[in-house]
Amino acid sequence: MTGLTFAVGGILTATGVVAYFASDASSMTALIPSALGVLILVAAVISRAPKARRHAIHAALAIALLGIAGTAMNVMKIGELFAGTAERPNAVIASTVTFVVLLVFLAVGIASFVRARRYRAQQPTNAPA
């Protein structure tokens, strides 16, 4: 999960930078994907420490959930983008990319934690009888 977390953080950071320059550097909100990406990258760096891994990845997934909620409004306007009537097409594209990347990351992260929990539950305990 640490490698995936680094990848997601990098993709989001790049998405925000591209969106910012595509908007002629006129919209600071275009950097929101980058802000999410940097926060996720920080969690990825922290997750390299074995004792902090679980907590850091949980934090990254919580950031992903907030990002999904925050980008959903623009994603709902994807129909307008295809119709050519979107007021801010760059924002819709950047939000959709962010939404999809975060949704996949969240799904993979949840599946990973479920697998890890099942694996730990199957392991014998070393507690004295």
Image (cartoon, helix red, strand yellow):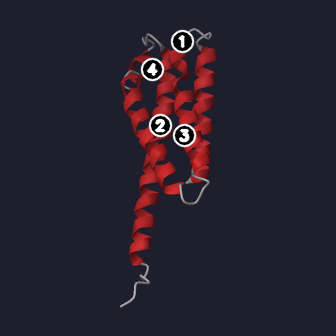
User: SS of the residue at dot 1?
Assistant: loop
Give whichever of discs 2 and 1 has the lower sequence position. 1
In space, the residues marked 4 and 2 are separated at their CA atoms by: 17 Å
For label 2, the residue is 100
- Marks 2/1: CA distance? 22 Å
Residue depth check, mark 3 versus mark 4: number of the one nearer the observer: 3
The disc at residue 116 is: none
User: Which mark lies nearer to you, 2 or 1?
Assistant: 1
Residue in view at x 54 percent, y 36 percent: 39
Residue type, mark 4 in image: Phe
Q: Identify the element where label 4 is drawn.
A: helix
Q: Earlier in the sequence, mark 3 or mark 4?
A: 3
Disc 3 on helix, strand or loop?
Answer: helix
| Circles 1 and 4 in contact, beta carbons < 8 Å | no
Identify the amino acid type marked 1: Ser
Task: Name the residue type under label 3.
Answer: Ile
Nearest to N terminus: mark 2 or mark 3: 3
Q: Examine the image and state in which quarter residue 17 appears.
A: top right
**Residue drawn at (40%, 39%) of the image:** 65
* Residue 64 location, quadrant: top left
Residue type marked 2: Val
Whole-number angstrom distance, CA of label 1 to CA of label 3: 22 Å
**Secondary structure of the residue carrying numbered label 2:** helix
Name the residue tied to disc 1: 27
Rendering coords of residue 30 (x, y %) = 53, 19
The image shows residue 43 at horizontal and vertical percentages of: 55, 44
Front-most of 20 and 39? 39
Q: Tell me residue 120's x, y (percent).
A: 43, 72
The residue labelled by disc 3 is: 40
Q: Which residue is mark 4?
A: 82
Instruction: Name the residue: 37% across, 32% down.
Output: 69
CB under 8 Å between discs 3 and 4: no
